[in-house]
Image: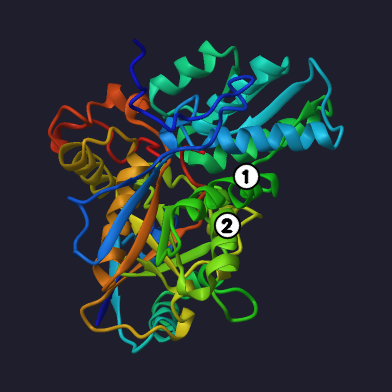
Amino acid sequence: MATIKIPPVLRSAVGGEREISADGDNVGEILRAVVEEHPSTQAQLFGADGDLNRYVNVYLNDEDVRVLEGLATTVGVSDTLVILPAMAGGAR
Amino acid sequence: MATDLRNKPCGGRYGDIIEAIGHTPLIELKRLSPKPGVRLWVKLESRNPTGSVKDRVARALILDAEDKGLIRPGQTILEPTSGNTGISLAMICARKGYKLKVVMPDNVTPERTDLLRMYGAEIVYSEGSKGSNGAVELALDMAAKDSDYYMPYQYGNEANPNAHYNGTALEILEELDEVSAFVAGLGTGGTLMGNGRRLKEELGDKVKIVAAEPMQGEPVQGLRSLDDGFIPPIIDISLLDRKIFVTNQDAITWTRKLLDEEQLFVGVSTGAIARVAVRIAGELDEGNVVFIAADDGSKYFSSGIYTRPIEEIENLDSTVWW
C-alpha cells in the first residue's frame, strides 16, 4: 500500500488524518481509492473532466506527477504520494 | 609604474546602476559535483545591484510599461511580492521617479522590510498564513479598486520571462556550448520559462529544464479550499522536464553546504536549487549542469541559518524563506 500525505486543507475530508494509505498501481488508481473511502475528497481532487483539479499538485515521493506521466504514473508499494495545494512561489 | 588590473575582464562600464543589471558570473563548483565528467555551474545572480535575480525582472517590467506608455512619472506602482522583486522595483522606481507600494506577507524576514524602506517603498502587509497567495490576492483587489495604481504583475507579465530569454540565457550560452540541465527555483516561473524556452530553442530537447520548488510548511498553507490555489499565468508546465519539491530543512542544509564547501554566501532558495542540481548531476554521465543562485544571504542573517545548528532555527516551517 502506498502512503498518501494529506495537506491541512484536505484533512477534514479524511477524518482529520495527516497520512492515509491506499491500494493501486498508479497515481490515478490510488487517488480513486482515496475518493471511494472518503467521498468528499472527490470535488477537491478531481475536476469535472476526471483529471486532477488544476490547483492540486501530487508528488510521487518529491516529483510532480504532472511532469511524469500524470495519473498513469506507476507507484510502488513503498512509495509516498504527497498532495499539496498549488501555491504562489515565495520570495518573488 | 601602473600595475595591470588582475580582474580583467571587468564587469563592464555602464551609464547608471540600472544598466549594470545582469552580466553575472558563472562559477564552477568542483567540490559539489558528484562525478568527474559532470561539471556543475552556478550563475551568481546575487551579484546584481540589489543582490538578486529580480533586478533583471524588475527592470524588464518597468521598461516594458514605459515602452507601452502605461506609466507616467510620479505614478504609484503596486506589486505583490515577498521580497526580492519589491526590493529591485524599489531601487529602480527610486531612480526613475515612480512611487512604489508593495504587498508582502507579514512573516517574511525583517531584512526585506528594511531594504524596501531603505529605497523608499511603502509596504502593505498581507496575512502571513496565506503565503504569497495572500499577497497576490490583496494586491489584485487593491488594483481593481483604484485605477491610479499600475501593477506590473510579475506573475502574469511576459516581460518577466523575457528578461531571462533575452538576458540570463544568452549569458549562459555565451559561456557554455553545451548544457545538459538547467535548474532554477519555481516561484513566478519567469526564470524557468525564459531560460527554458531559449535554451531549448538553441540546444534542443537534450537540455533538461528542472524546477526546484519550495514545499511550503504547513503553517503557510492557510487555504480554505484547494480552489484558492494559485498557478502563475506565465507558467507553461509542458516546458519542464522535472519538477521536484524541497523541504525548508533540506533547503537550509544545502544553503549551509554551499557556504561550507564552496564558500558561496547565498539565500535559502539557492540551497534548495543546489540540492536538486546535484541530484540531477548524479543521474548524468557527463555534461554541464547550470543552476541559478537567486540571491545572496544578507536577507536571512537574522534567522541564524548561517551560524546556528538547524534544530535551533525558529519558525522553520512558518517562515516564507523563498
**Which one is nearer the viewer's eye here, B122 or B3?**
B3
**Which one is nearer the viewer's eye here, B100 or B93?**
B93
Mark 2: which secondary structure? helix
Q: Residue furthest bottom?
A: A25
Residue A39 location (% of width, % of height): 47, 76
Residue B124 location (% of width, % of height): 59, 22
**Mark 1 and mark 2: Cα distance apart in space:** 10 Å
Q: How many marks?
A: 2
Q: Give the foreground label among 1 and 2.
A: 1
Residue name at image x 32 percent, y 58 percent = B277
Indicate the chain on which mark 2 is placed: B
Above-or-below relation of B259 to B100: below
Quadrant housing the C terminus of chain B: top left
Above-or-below relation of B191 to B264: below
Residue holding disc 2: B193
Q: Is residue B118 left or right of residue B253?
A: right
For disc 1, the neighbor class at 10 Å (few under 14, some 14 to 19, many from 20) is many
Is residue A5 in view from this perspective? no
Q: Kindly indicate the quadrant of the structure image that contains residue A81.
A: bottom left
Indicate the chain on which mark 1 is placed: B
Residue holding disc 1: B163
